[in-house]
Image: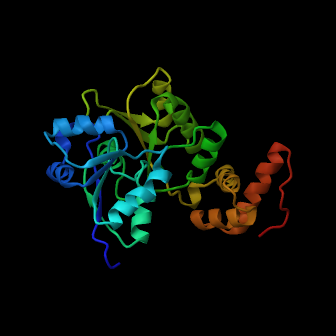
Amino acid sequence: MVGVTGTLVLAGTPIGDTADAPPRLAAELAAADVIAAEDTRRLRRLTQALDVRPAARVVSYFEGNESARTPELVESLAEGARVLLVTDAGMPSVSDPGYRLVAAAVERGITVTAVPGPSAVLTALAVSGLPVDRFCFEGFPPRKAGERLTRLREVADERRTLVWFEAPHRLDDTLAAMAEVFGPDRRAAVCRELTKTYEEVRRGPLAELAAWAAEGVRGEITIVVEGAPAPGPEEAGPAELARRVAVREEAGERRKEAIAAVAQEAGLPKRQVFDAVVAAKNATGSAPREGKAP
């Protein structure tokens, strides 16, 4: 776009130890025309630790004012400003403010770049001891118990390693829900206060971690959970097949599609999965909602 010379810089900040700040972060803090910070007080502490005295105009940019402040920042960018976006820790827009501003800048044809920095997601994955070749980041689980169970059921059969953020006061309930949905023996790691003085990584089965968390946990939390196993036909008995169909139904799939998907995953005929669902319904005294075999 003609006349647009500004640049939006997404700057990763330390997740704990300020010594982890990349050298370029200090340079960008000094060179910015505008600094949008999730918490201006934390920004002040960071610049003091890095011995930087920014000349930029500093504005707050957090969840409560993100929608209202985005157009203002985009106009500054359109006028040629170099706008630096920082959050309290880690990379902006990853479970933090930033996505709206990036999307608006891209739509206006404004250059968007980043200062790579520490990431709680990748750090937790690296130290978890769980497979890291394929993973997915799920953000924060829903706060309400019912919505949390629904979200967990949606990924119950996900084979990639799962990464979550969680507040310390909800950790025990979340781990207990994960043990219920994923199984008590599914391996996991709870990473607490990464790179900080009291860093701790607890590894073990979900049920064991839930019992530990019930005693009370403090600090910033990242949870890493092993992906679902890929069982062969001999490992998927009727009860397990019925459970997988039920999980998919609760996540919103129609029974016919759920049966077809489970049959494909298990390498079995659809009729065999259908029979397992019927047997499970008969065992609980309720008839299946769809009586025709696929």
Residue 294 as seen in the image, left or right of residue 30: right
Residue 286 as seen in the image, left or right of residue 249: right
Q: How many marks?
A: 0
Image position, residue 166 (x, y; %): 46, 38
**The one of 249 and 45 positioned closer to us in this rendering:** 45
Residue farthest to the top, as pictured: 215
Residue farthest to the bottom, as pictured: 2
For residue 174, which quarter of the picture?
top right
Q: How is the image coloured?
A: rainbow
**The one of 43 and 286 positioned closer to us in this rendering:** 43
Image position, residue 135 (x, y; %): 41, 56
- State the quadrant of the C terminus: bottom right
Looking at the image, is 193 positioned above or below residue 138?
Answer: above
Residue 129 seen: no
**Residue at x 76%, y 60% (from the top left corner):** 275
Looking at the image, is 71 positioned above or below residue 179?
Answer: below
**The one of 266 and 223 positioned closer to us in this rendering:** 223
**Residue at x 40%, y 47% (from the top left corner):** 61
- State the quadrant of the N terminus: bottom left
**Residue at x 50%, y 23% (from the top left corner):** 214
Image position, residue 230 (x, y; %): 50, 57
Residue 256 as seen in the image, left or right of residue 13: right
Image position, residue 105 (x, y; %): 39, 65
Looking at the image, is 274 positioned above or below residue 92?
Answer: below
For residue 187, which quarter of the picture?
top left
Residue 146 seen: yes
**The one of 200 and 281 positioned closer to us in this rendering:** 200
**Residue at x 85%, y 62% (from the top left corner):** 291
